[in-house]
Image (cartoon, rainbow, N blue to C red):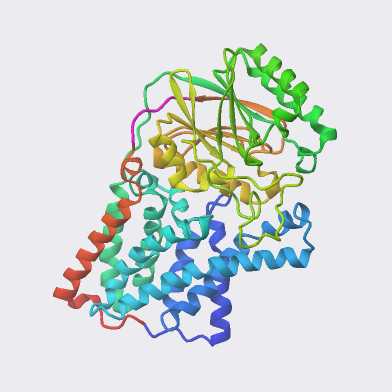
Amino acid sequence: MPAITIPPAARLLLVFALGALMPLGFSPYHLVALPIVALAILMRLGQAQPVRMGYVFGLGWFVTGAWWLAPTVHIYGGLPWYAAALVVCLVGAILAIFPALWMGLSHGLMRRLAYPSAVLLVYPMMIMPVAWLRGHIFTGLPWESLGNLVVDTPALGWLSVVGVYGAACLPVAAASCLWALSCQAHRRAGIAATLIWLLVLGATPNITMPQSPIVHAALVQPNIAQEHKWDANFLASTMHTLTQLSSTQAKQADMIVWPEAAVPFYFENNPIWNSWLQQQMASWHTPVVFGGIKYFPDSKTSQNGLYLFTPSDGFSGFVGKHHLVPFGEYVPSWLPWVHTLVPDIGDFREARDAGVLQLGQHIVGSLICYESIFPEEARARVKAGAQVLVVVTNDAWYGTSPAAWQHLQAARVRAVEEGRFVLRAGNTGVTAVIAPNGRVVQSIPWWTASVLLGKYQWMYRHTLYQKWGDMGILVLWGLGALLLIILQVYRPKWGGSDATQ
């Protein structure tokens, strides 16, 4: 098949448009085939200028994927619309570096190989370290991680083995097969690779559900408007909404969960509300896990975290948030003039605790909002003994944009990686119970004041990902490198001779 000839300007626009299709593969759209097709065409068009094409593709992906940041920083950060638009463009410009890096590294390796069709291995191999890097460098931002696509496919079981960064190779491998099948010089190699990919899909590990007893959690969704959340004039309304919703399900629940920063005041500074709240909770005879802020007078700092209230011991535990949101919960020391988005609250400090709460004979793992997009945070909680993961969040910042559903999708991936039920309580939603197989088994409509009486089970088994973490990426890399060496040595004639076709 002759090489595709497209004018340079039109090629850049096409690649940008292909990148703009990527968010449609994620929740709430779940059009997983679109990113695979887009990546396959990028591989075809990006042969001549891989870094440039990868960067333009990344711009299309992350600028359109992060559009919801504009109304967020405009409404709650007070930025004018033009500055809000610049924030989105800046985020896109930074994150676009990673697709450019992936394309550049892939083609750099290909130039050193004597077997052109080995690109079928190189693309999936190189995406894994790049995905890992995006999740860690500059505190990490693995939003719309390619591995998240797997949770909505029959291959989701591999998340329990190699995690979200390792699973990024699966959609890229599918795209590589599609690319090879479209090139006459690589068609035979593409057919062989497709058969191997189907075998990998067929070998997806099964996720079995336990036979342990069913327990219940009342997940409260108060639907407090963001502009009222920190307004003292609405404090009474907020507290009465939370307690009234909780009281409707307290007798049926083994645990009550309130969302992130549900109690918008320092207990130390509000003894009257402190006493009233404890009286309400004590009357339910049910443990309550709730989001709140804690002040540390010695350091004059605050932590965003989770409190535990038990009828017998009162406030018996607190764990703080470990992974803070840059510019939202703290200002980097090298940018002291930038204000946080949360009004009237100083910079938070990150927690150093284990991130778990002791609830009788059981251990609850805490993931606070932003933390749920990071696999290492969930893994640390389970390593500390967590038998269920509680995600508390306030996604009111995102409005009715897809961001809230993408946030939920990340929590589904954490459930599969760790083999744990996830109890997710959101201020405006999405409030849901997620099973260890990644399925949302119960939920309530978002942007409504309601409470979900969710069923879950305490889990004790450990997945391979929980045991080994991202070491699975190294194993996949080793297998890929071994196969590349074999191909280099034998140089099969059916692989073609021109990687650019």
472 relative position to 101: left or right: left
Q: Nearer the viewer, residue 211 or 279?
A: 279
**Farthest-out residue, right:** 233
Q: Nearer the viewer, residue 415 or 296?
A: 296
- In this rendering, the answer to whether 206 lies above or below 105 is above
- In this rendering, the answer to whether 100 lies above or below 497 is above
Residue drawn 57% across the image and 52% down it: 29
- In this rendering, the answer to whether 205 lies above or below 237 is below
The answer to whether residue 432 is magenta is: no
The answer to whether residue 461 is magenta is: yes
The image quadrant where one finds the C terminus is bottom left
95 relative position to 474: left or right: right
103 relative position to 313: left or right: left
Residue drawn 70% across the image and 15% down it: 279
Tell me how many marks there are: 0
- In this rendering, the answer to whether 371 lies above or below 295 is below
Residue drawn 40% across the image and 54% down it: 165
Question: Over which residues does the magenta segment extend?
Answer: 456-462
Quarter of the image for residue 267 reads top right
Quarter of the image for residue 123 reads bottom left
The image quadrant where one finds the N terminus is bottom left
Residue 174 visible somewhere in the drawing: no
Q: Nearer the viewer, residue 487 or 478?
A: 478
Q: Main secondary structure of the magenta part?
A: loop
Quarter of the image for residue 111 reads bottom left
Residue drawn 28% across the image and 60% down it: 477
426 relative position to 18: left or right: right
Instruction: Provide residue 128's location: percent of width, then percent of height.
Output: 38, 60
